[in-house]
Each structure stands twice: as structure tokens, then as C-alpha cells.
Amino acid sequence: MIKIAPSILSANFANLVSDIKAVEDAGADMLHIDVMDGHFVPNITIGAPVVKSLRKVSGLIFDVHLMIEKPESYIKDFADAGADIISVHAEASRHLHRLLQMIKSEGIKASLALNPATPINVIEHLLDDIDMILIMSVNPGFGGQEFIPAIYEKISLLKEYLLKKNKSIPIQVDGGIGLSNIKKVCDCGAEVIVSGSAIFRSENVKETIRLMKKADED
Ligand code: DX5
Ligand code: ZN
């Protein structure tokens, strides 16, 4: 069964609580929270205080995607704020193993994110330290961008590699996914789908999430 992680980047920031409730009621499996610092990516979004406030109004799994420099300086803040999963970018740290251990030592799940141009072999010596792999299918920084077609093959190669290694680490894919391509993304091996604009800009959030979740059934 496909897991859906709506990205609040495309929600109404003046009405976050009701937008989050809407995806929660619609059966979202987790809430994808995009944190950007204006350095690692050319955009600024929200920080740990907002996550902490949202924690009080939602029981969803908080899937925090850190698109920031020096992620090691902020892991504790986001863990204390209520993150259940933290994704860190392979491109943002010189000491990835230590960073992933730091996340796990907070008692939460560690996920490794790869930009579109980053080869999948960076995970080779980290397979015992990651709970999820986030494959970016757009260049991080903005919602509403187009899915980069070369990423289909990247997902398939990663899935093949994980099967060969006998690892059941879920693959999350983020960027440019909607009803028109979700099936293809899942057929390649994705299990967790992040979607922002296709969910929050749709006329019927509930129906969109329902259709997304059954995309791999036919
Ligand atoms: C992009 C973010 C994504 C983004 C996805 O930098 O990491 O999570 O919000 O938005 P859509 O689904 O609109 O591409
Ligand atoms: Zn994201």
C-alpha cells in the first residue's frame, strides 16, 4: 500500500491547522514538513518553533525534511519539537554516519535525502544506519516543480540494489508527483510519496489522497 506524505509547503500558512486536519481526515500517512534555510536551498520556510506548535494540534507522523546547512546543529531542536522522522541531505554533511547516529540517539527515525544529481552509491556504507531513503525528484527549494524524468531510473536502480542487499528500507520520493505519475513512481519501487501542490491545490483533498493511495492497485 502506498504511503502518502502531504507536504505542507503548499498548504495555506495562514490556516495550517485546518489544512493539516484535512489531510489527516483524508487518510494521510504522515505529514511532510519542509525546512529550508536560504543557504542549502534558495528559499526560507519554517523552523523548530512552528513544528513544536503543530505537534500540539496533530497526531500525524511528523516527517521533517531538513534542507539546511549544518544540520547537525539543529537535530536536537527538531527532535524536541516533535519530529518522528528527520531527513538530512547527503550533500549537507561531511560526517553522514555521525549525523545519522545523532538522529537515532534522539529515539527517532533517520532518513537520508539525495538531490537529483547525487548518485545512489553514497548509501553503500550506511545501510545499517538509515530507516528511509528520500529520493528528490526535483531540485529542492520550491513546491510545484516538474518531476525530473531521469529519476524513474534512479528509483528502479535503488530498489534493485536494496533487494540485492536484502534490505527493506522504504524509498520515499519527493517533488513533482501527482495523479498522473504516481503509479509510475511506485512501479519503480517508491513506497512513500511526498506530494504538495497536487494535494493542497486540488479541489477535493480527500478524493485526491484516496486516488493516490490506490494508484498501484490497477
Ligand atoms: C521541495 C520540497 C518538496 C515540495 C514538494 O524542495 O522538498 O517537499 O514541497 O512539492 P510538490 O509536490 O509541489 O513538488
Ligand atoms: Zn520535501
Image (cartoon, rainbow, N blue to C red):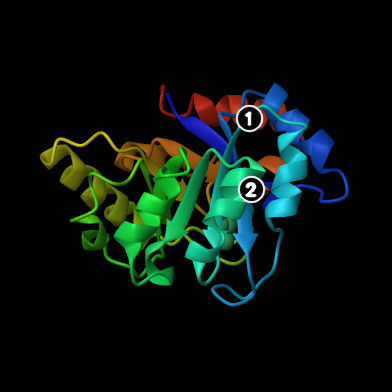
Q: Residue at x 53, y 48 (%)?
A: 177
- Residue 173, percent from left and from top: 44, 48
Seen in the picture, residue 65 relative to 39 is either above or below; the reply is: above
- In the picture, the disc for residue 196 is 2
Instruction: Describe the element under mark 1 as helix, strand or loop.
Output: loop
Outermost residue toward the right in this view: 14
Q: What residue is drawn where x is 28% and y is 54%?
A: 153
Local SS, label 2: loop
Disc 1: which residue = 60
Is residue 144 in sight in this rendering? no
Left or right: residue 206 compared with residue 133: right
Quarter-of-image position of residue 94: bottom left
Residue found at x 30% / y 38%: 169
User: In the rendered structure, which disc, 2 or 1, sits on the residue that comes first in sequence?
Assistant: 1
Residue 72: give x, y in percent of width and height.
48, 63
Relative to 19, residue 157 above or below? below
Q: How many marks?
A: 2
In which image quadrant can residue 171 be found?
top left
Decide if ligand 1 comes within 8 Å of the CB at mark 2: yes
**Image location (x, y in percent) of residue 214:** 49, 24
Q: CA distance from mark 2 to mark 1?
A: 16 Å
Q: Residues within 10 Å of mark 2 (few under 14, many from 20)?
A: many
